[in-house]
Amino acid sequence: MNIELTYITQHVNVNVISPSSSLDTEEGNLFNKNKVNKKRYKTIILSDLHLGTSTSKAKEVNHFLKHHKCETLILNGDIIDGWQLKKSGEWKKQHTKFFKLVLKRASKGTKIIYIRGNHDDFLDEVLPFTMGNFSIRLEYYLQSGNKKYYVVHGDIFDMVTTKLKWLAKLGDVSYTFLLWLNKHYNKRRERRGQPYYSLSQVIKAKVKSAVSFISDFETQLASVAKKKNCDGVICGHIHTPANKMIGDIHYLNSGDWVESLTALVETFEGEWKIIHYTEWLNELKMQLSYEVEESTDNIRELTNNY
């Protein structure tokens, strides 16, 4: 017996989603924000988006934000890359979209805290700034359960950035070239069916490990947090996500949205986690594929009854 589609859709909750849909498609695709329940956290921390550069993964961070809600959103520095915008940077539609999403959250009650970084040091001219739920600061103290965290971008504890700014900018030019090289290197790997390989992260890690840069940075920040009578420190700057103990100080680094594509989240139970975008995306695909399969089975069962 023929069954009209309208009858089926009235009796079965069906979301037919195409696995091949584009991330950019606004309606009826795999990642439609209305198809999946949003995860909610007490706090979400993002840093080092470097909006204004071609290597910023703005589309991905916007997609992440659409699927995650929180009471407090902390933007921990280098959100806008003023250094690149002064030279050869470019501002894209997705970069504007990010701030539209953030301001929309603020208008709905989310507390937004923007911490100034070294690449957005032009914010020094307006510090401190507060308007409603949106504020811009140099540092922040976050209460998490019975623990207090010192939140800072981290550049002020990087001697190269603070004392040798010309060298930092020279290094930024080299790093930008490295990211460009990494982009084209991985396009070639993709054509050959090979997995993503972060050439830039490997080279950067080798150079910095030679001077113990990351280790020294982490140790110094942990020491500062202790002097400030804090239980932990939350930073960004070095594009290296971390969640670990350094002595009795909880060290957290939110990573970046240029290479790592990571976010720090705090659950309502006070647990801190690092979310890797690519891993979360794969889980989302699996969840939606399961829902499609379940909906298909429901339709099949319904039609077999007639």
Image: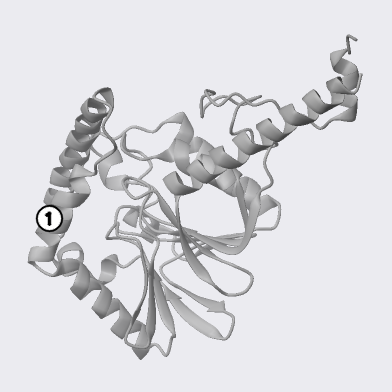
Residue lying farthest to the top in this orientation: 2
Q: Quadrant of the N terminus?
A: top right
Relative horizontal placement of residue 176, taking residue 28 as reference (left or right): left
Residue at 30% in and 39% down: 85
Q: How many labels were placed on the picture?
A: 1
Q: Quadrant of the C terminus?
A: top right
Between 248 and 220, the residue placed more toward the observer is: 248
Relative horizontal placement of residue 2, taking residue 181 as reference (left or right): right
The quarter of the picture where residue 287 lies is top right
Residue at 52% in and 23% down: 20
Please, what is the three-letter code of the amino acid marked with disc 1? Answer: Trp
* Colouring mode (rainbow / by chain / secondary structure / one colour): one colour
Residue 165 at x, y = what percent? 16, 59
Q: Residues within 10 Å of mark 1 (few under 14, many from 20)?
A: few
Relative horizontal placement of residue 79, taking residue 39 as reference (left or right): left
Residue lying farthest to the left in this orientation: 210
Q: Secondary structure at mark 1?
A: helix
Between 65 and 150, the residue placed more toward the observer is: 65
Q: Reply above or below: 149 against 229.
A: above
Residue 161 at x, y = what percent? 19, 62
Relative horizontal placement of residue 120, taking residue 65 as reference (left or right): left
Residue at 60% in and 34% down: 289
Q: Is residue 152 visible?
A: no
Q: Which residue is mark 1?
A: 166
Q: Is residue 111 visible?
A: yes
The quarter of the picture where residue 246 lies is bottom left
Q: Reply above or below: 295 against 215.
A: above
Residue at 30% in and 56% down: 239
Residue 198 at x, y = what percent? 24, 44
Residue 219 at x, y = what percent? 25, 79
